[in-house]
Amino acid sequence: MIIVAGIVLSIMYASIKVSYERCIVRVAYAITGLGLFIYVLTEVLSLFGKMNRFTCTATWIIYDCILLALVLSQWRINKMRLTDITHEILAKISAKEYLCVAIFAVYGLFICLLSVRIVPYNWDSLSYHLSRLWFWTQNESVGHFTTSDTRMLGTPAFKEFIDLHLYLLYGKNNDSVFNLTQSVSYLFNILFVYSIARRIGCSFKGGLFASVLFATSPTVFAESLSTQTDEFAALWIFVFVSVLLELVYCDDKLQLNKRGIIRLCVLAFSLALSILTKPSGLFCVAVFFFWLLYICLKRGDNIALIVKWILLVAAIMVITILPEAIRNIVTYGAISDPWQGPGQLVLTFDLRYQIVNFFKSIGYFLPGVLWPSFNQIWQHMVYYLGYVLHIDVDSLIISEGGNYHDSLIYKIENYEYDTATNSVITILFIVISLVAIAKCVWYFICRIRKTGSTSNTCPVRLGYSTAAFAAFIVTCAFVKSEVYVCRYMIAAFGLLAVAISFQIQKLGEYRSKLLEGVVYGAAGLLICSQFIGMTNYHMGHIFVGTDEDRAKAYYETYNMSEYESVYVVLKQYLEDKGETYHSIGLKMDAGAYSYPTLRLLEEYSDSVYFIDVYNSSSKYLDKTNVPDSIVVITFSDMGDMYSEGYSYNGYNYMRDGQLSGRCNVFIK
């Protein structure tokens, strides 16, 4: 509860004496400040090797007490009472808004209760996301360590910093609380989508449609119930855009006064925390940055001041990410794991690849229950486009893994956390884009023929909608196409949902209310269909059972073979032996589920660490350590490979049992 108290108090302090309309911007400030506190706290405690339950609990209590004192002090200074604040808020919202707030509160409670009942089951989390949490806890530091899977080190880690606090406070008893980071981020993301929609001029109905369109997208919903990072990464993009819109729509120009410095810091820190979480949303940032630059130049902001803003934001970002960059430089000789970042982007100056990659990615979003065979049509279109442009559709430049035919041909509407589709948003995007293209073509035809009204203006203007559509297109074009690309797009989908809602609203204002109603009705039916389907699907993952059943739940969705050939036999061996070891050496292939194994081994050992590692993390291996026992786990069946025993650091270990073709145990 102390973390929840910290979130609530941060928002309360940031929102004192702020109008109802601007409250969400102060929420962005509070979230950024809280995120920065967690980041700095984790880095400082890790620096001294003191990141443990006691220091974490004590620091959170101190943080909450300080915030509570500040809130009460501000209330006393401003002569504010809780009843007056409540009355003021209720007086400013309409009955329909109050109803929506109540529904949202119930929905948020439903999401949180559902998320803590789902055992972590996705492959990434069980192979490296949660495993590094375990090692951080053992080492009392987030510093790099020896590992057979370098994704534990090279993958951006800030979301796991949050999970580390949850793990130290609650997670050792129930690791389902890790889902709450994504769930709470999802709920804040919905609020930001609604707020952004209202800020750019959407009506209450338009803002509500944008938030519902975003919230019920299968990928967005599925990610909120997982231990992945994409909802949390999208949160920082929404914070950035919310503050950016304050600069776009402000009455005055860029300034470096108190308000300007606060906005500058929030922009910089939100970008830095986004990079430290997952940089896939930076394509959206780039597009909106150029839009803001265009607005500033158009209204005549001081160019020297613009340059100062850019340099200050860049400097703050660099300082913030410096600890992680230093760790990566020591480990990899680069500021990031070369495999993790550039390898997932389309990095070529040949725009033909970006064009084909864009259409490939769209194909992964489109499948729906009403058009199950559309995959084949889209697939033929993409291959024909590649033929026309003389581009290999399955080139490694634009393919993360597997060929497009095999990936797409069996792709149907599903609700998995990694591969769920987003057909409603994508269809609306395509329709609005085609209408805009047709209007532009007609406009230029009229210009060439010099016909039509003299007041005829270009139908596309450089406003929010253009920036959001461009951000979505650029992200689709530059993030390598793969079957999992949907979850990298959450921020882009949220910003796009706002733009779509705004365009539908304009359709009703300037063209036809009837047509606007038809669009809302058709989209609403598809949204309801999706919501019912995905709710039923994820309710099926609710865990009910004993601790032994819980261990099985880690594996049963994707990896039951490893459960039977590794976890079950190793658990039986340890129970039969009944011994406790000072240390256990673990040799485990990358990609195997290391987290459940580590949770099992910690019951029988004071420490567990990887041995015989031959990657960039081998420099952290303490070769003076001599484990009491060695457990060897392979990704596939290796037969009788270790029949002659195992040698490590000059000591010979004899095999105490071949538990399976994938699991062997050795003792001195």
Image: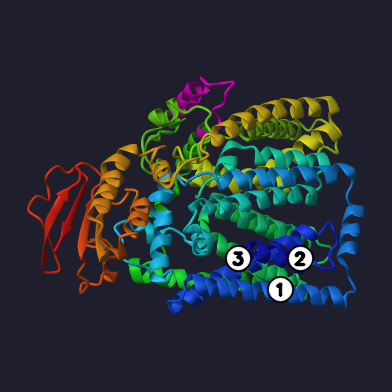
Residue at 84 percent of width and 45 percent of height: 97
Q: Earlier in the sequence, mark 2 or mark 1?
A: 2
Amino acid type indicated by mark 2: Met
Q: Is residue 134 left or right of residue 36?
A: left
Q: Residues within 10 Å of mark 1 (few under 14, many from 20)?
A: some
Q: Quadrant of residue 213?
A: top right
Considering depth in this image, is 38 or 642 the residue closer to the camera? 642
Considering depth in this image, is 661 or 324 the residue closer to the camera? 661
State which quarter of the image contains the C terminus. Answer: bottom left
Q: Earlier in the sequence, mark 3 or mark 1?
A: 3
* Residue 379 x %, y %: 46, 26
Q: Which residue is mark 2?
A: 12
Amino acid type indicated by mark 1: Leu
Residue 35's tag is 3
* Residue 60 x %, y %: 60, 71
Q: Is residue 658 above or below residue 520?
A: below
Q: Is residue 513 left or right of residue 274?
A: right
State which quarter of the image contains the N terminus. Answer: bottom right
Report the Cα–Cα distance between label 3 and label 2. 16 Å
**Callouts 2 and 1 close, C-beta under 8 Å:** yes
Q: Which residue is mark 1?
A: 67
Q: Quadrant of residue 241?
A: bottom right
